[in-house]
Image (tube, rainbow, N blue to C red):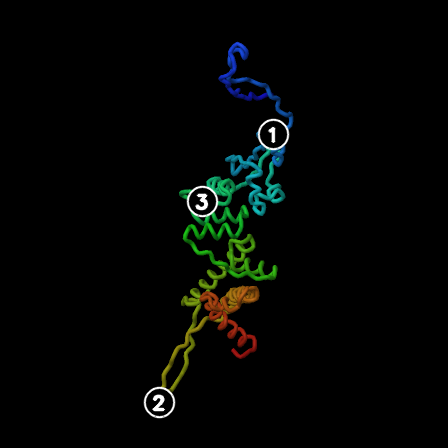
């Protein structure tokens, strides 16, 4: 391979035409290029240093850039060689990410523009926020992006203990993991069971009346006291114990794992949970003690 280099000669008007011959304004020279491409860090060996582009495949759409562009942010996923290595496809010689291709153009532009994050049109803010978090662009980038979008970034406290943090995420944030989704599903099922159990107890076939003789002011009167039948009482009580026991365990775990108990008791939903479980605990204690 060779390249053509054009060199312009300097014209001297005092030089005789007969001595210099016909004037040649350009001269073509053949320059042989080295067989190996120069390294990206060495710019002294070659006038035009060459760096091989890297291919990034995002759900079938390929993007090309340079490693030096990605390494402008070494703490990010694409800028760190060790972190992006697990996404490398040796067969196709590219990095593959199963993400939404519509959002990656903004991520790549962030690297190419040296830290400017722009939201493309028809892209929701929370979708781009998830991509910023996935590619690890950093907390400062996320805060600046939300500030530019006129949104407030709220820092929520998290437990310092790793076990408490796992329990807190599991019982407080259903989208954090698969186990958290299972816990949320159990909560929904038991809430529905508790509501149905309360409603079924009001049906006439599950209730009975006991006559009661009273004589206020020397006048004999008969009253009827309704209550759940003894046959249905056992089943309804068992369902109530099951549901409320789970709600009690859920409340105790969240109370134990919460980063700040003062904030925990200031939330209205937690106050409702406490007020709904306290009567059950009181009735269960009376039942176990044999008072009722």
- Closer to us: 212 or 138: 138
Query: From this viewpoint, which residue is outermost toward the bottom?
Result: 218
Query: From this viewpoint, which residue is outermost toward the top?
Result: 18
Q: Residue tagged by mark 1?
A: 46
Position of residue 190 measured from the top left corner of the image (x, y, whole percent): 50, 61
Q: Residue tagged by mark 2?
A: 217
Q: State the image quarter where residue 217 is shown.
A: bottom left
Task: Classify residue 120 as left or right of residue 90.
Answer: left
| As drawn, 273 above or below 77 | below
Mark identifier at residue 118 = 3
Depth check, mark 2 against mark 1: the one in front is 1
| As drawn, 291 above or below 183 | below
Mark 3 element type = loop
Position of residue 255 measured from the top left corner of the image (x, y, whole percent): 54, 66
Position of the N terminus, as image quadrant, is top right
Q: CA distance from mark 2 to mark 3?
A: 84 Å
Mark 1 element type = loop
């Amino acid at each position: 391979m060779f390249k053509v280099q054009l060199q312009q000669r300097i014209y001297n008007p005092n030089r005789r035409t007969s001595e210099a011959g016909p004037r040649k304004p350009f001269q073509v020279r053949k320059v042989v290029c080295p067989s190996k491409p120069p390294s990206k860090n060495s710019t002294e060996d070659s006038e035009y240093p060459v760096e091989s582009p890297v291919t990034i495949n995002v759900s079938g759409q390929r993007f090309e850039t340079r490693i030096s562009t990605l390494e402008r942010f070494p703490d990010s996923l694409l800028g760190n060689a060790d972190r992006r290595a697990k996404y490398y496809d040796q067969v196709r010689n590219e990095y593959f990410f199963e993400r939404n291709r519509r959002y990656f153009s903004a991520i790549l532009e962030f690297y190419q523009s040296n830290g400017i994050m722009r939201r493309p049109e028809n892209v929701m803010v929370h979708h781009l926020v998830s991509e910023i978090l996935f590619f690890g662009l950093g907390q400062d980038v996320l805060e600046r992006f939300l500030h530019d979008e006129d949104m407030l970034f709220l820092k929520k406290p998290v437990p310092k203990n790793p076990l408490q943090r796992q329990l807190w995420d599991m019982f407080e944030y259903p989208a954090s993991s698969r186990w958290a989704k299972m816990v949320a599903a159990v909560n929904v099922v038991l809430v529905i069971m508790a509501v149905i159990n309360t409603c079924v107890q009001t049906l006439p076939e599950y209730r009975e009346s006991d006559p009661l003789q009273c004589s206020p002011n020397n006048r004999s009167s008969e009253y009827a006291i309704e209550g759940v039948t003894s046959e249905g009482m056992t089943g309804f009580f068992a369902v109530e114990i099951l549901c409320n026991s789970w709600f009690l365990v859920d409340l105790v775990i969240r109370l134990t794992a919460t980063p700040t108990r003062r904030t925990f008791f200031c939330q209205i939903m937690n106050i409702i949970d406490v007020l709904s479980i306290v009567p059950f605990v009181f009735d269960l204690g009376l039942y176990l003690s044999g008072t009722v």
